[in-house]
Image (cartoon, rainbow, N blue to C red):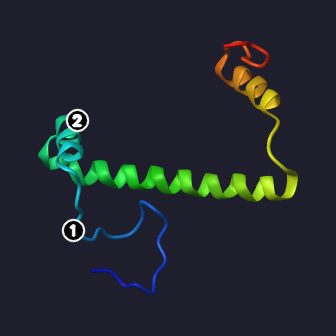
Amino acid sequence: MFNDDVDFLPGDGPTSGISVTLTAGTLQAIRERVGKRGVSAYLEKAAQRQIERDNLDELIADFEEVHGPADPEAVAAKRARLTGGASSAGVAA
């Protein structure tokens, strides 16, 4: 076990075993991807990605509280620049 008084960033510090309950289908899908011995590493990476997404959601919420929601057309234009695709702004479905 590790010292609870020490703060670690996600992905840092010693490992610690815990018990996790998953549905049979989720566990089966993970094992099909990584095998029986890769489950812990897969869940570690998935947890790290979720923490990153949660932090980003909090950052966006803080930004929107100060500046209001982002302009959907501006977001679409920036997405198009980043992905090299055409902007979907103004395109009817």
Graded by Cα atoms within 10 Å as few (under 14), some (14 to 19) or many (20 or more), the crowding at tag 2 reads: few
| Point 64% across, 21% down: residue | 83
Position above or below: 4 against 47:
below
- Give the camera-side residue of 44 and 8: 44
Image position of 58 (left or right of 54): right
- Amino acid tagged 2: Arg
| Residue wearing tag 1 | 19
Q: Residue furthest left?
A: 36
Give x and y (percent) for residue 89.
77, 19
| Point 69% across, 56% down: residue | 59
| Point 32% across, 80% down: residue | 2
- Give the camera-side residue of 28 and 39: 28
**Of pointers 1 and 2, the one earlier in the residue sequence:** 1
| Residue wearing tag 2 | 33
Q: Which mark is residue 62?
A: none
Give x and y (percent) for residue 26.
24, 45
Give the quadrant of residue 92.
Answer: top right
Location of the N terminus by quadrant is bottom left
